[in-house]
């Protein structure tokens, strides 16, 4: 009798999986992909209208920070994170009027803001890799409170370099099979 119940439960689970469009997470696939990505070397990019900014290591990132990024890169981050510009500006501590004026004048972000945008972009790209480029799953993960981050949503930590690094650490743990 116990076997029959177990068999029915297994059948119910199989039927549920067949009707569901959600893919099961495969940690083995993720670990293999991570090894390939690290071996090939990562190249990040921020594409703004009329400008493509790329970097592949920390020294290239430092050079970009010193030069400054265009204000349009804030919109790129907002799109990558599926956040409204207003919220991105709040994380950066920039008033909307200052942003509008400096963007119109084609000014560059400060070094601190450029660094936050670059590191933020790296983490968002890494998060998409961890979630096998399933944008919806990654966006849900960003908005859902996370125990390993003190029961706050990962996106709420995007206001500082330390917070962004903690989100990256949580993604690393998730990629290698630790629950995050």
Image: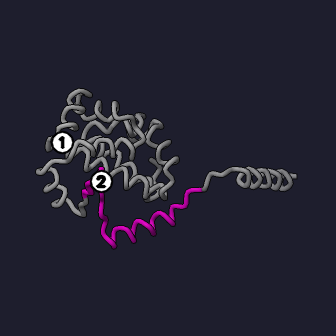
Res 60 quadrant in image = bottom left
Snapshot colouring? one colour
Residue 45 belongs to magenta span: yes
Residue 57's x, y, as percent? Answer: 22, 62
The residues colored magenta run: 24-53
Left or right: where does residue 117 sit relative to residue 37? Answer: left
Q: Is residue 1 above or below residue 34?
A: above
Q: Identify residue for label 2.
A: 46
Badge 2 marks a residue whose secondary structure is strand
The residue depicted at 43 percent of the width and 42 percent of the height is 142
Question: How many dots with numbers?
Answer: 2
Residue placed most toward the observer, 164 or 133: 133
Is residue 139 visible in this depiction of the protein? yes
Task: Using a 10 Å C-alpha cutoff, classify the residue at mark 2 as few (fewer than 14 neighbours), some (14 to 19) or many (20 or more).
Answer: many
Residue 168's x, y, as percent? Answer: 34, 50
Residue 75's x, y, as percent? Answer: 32, 42
Residue placed most toward the observer, 61 or 106: 106
Left or right: where does residue 71 sit relative to residue 124? Answer: left
Residue 128: mark in rendering = none
Q: Is residue 10 above or below residue 34?
A: above
Q: Identify residue for label 1.
A: 106
The residue depicted at 31 percent of the width and 54 percent of the height is 47
Q: Earlier in the sequence, mark 2 or mark 1?
A: 2
Residue 115 belongs to magenta span: no
The residue depicted at 39 percent of the width and 40 percent of the height is 154
């Amino acid at each position: 009798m116990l076997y029959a119940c177990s068999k029915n439960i297994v059948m119910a689970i199989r039927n549920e999986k067949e009707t569901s469009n959600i893919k099961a997470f495969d940690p083995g696939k993720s670990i293999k992909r991570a090894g390939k990505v690290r071996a090939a070397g990562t190249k990040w990019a921020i594409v703004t209208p009329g400008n493509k900014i790329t970097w592949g290591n920390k020294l290239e990132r430092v050079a970009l920070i010193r030069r400054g990024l265009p204000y349009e890169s804030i919109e790129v981050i907002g799109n990558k994170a599926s956040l409204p510009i207003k919220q991105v500006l709040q994380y950066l501590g920039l008033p909307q009027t200052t942003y509008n004026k400096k963007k119109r004048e084609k000014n560059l972000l400060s070094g601190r803001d450029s660094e936050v945008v670059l590191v933020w972009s790296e983490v968002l790209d890494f998060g998409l890799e961890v979630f096998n480029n399933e944008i919806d799953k990654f966006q849900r993960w960003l908005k859902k409170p996370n125990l390993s981050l003190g029961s706050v949503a990962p996106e709420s930590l995007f206001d500082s370099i330390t917070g962004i690094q903690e989100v990256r650490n949580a993604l690393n743990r998730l990629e290698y099979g630790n629950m995050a």
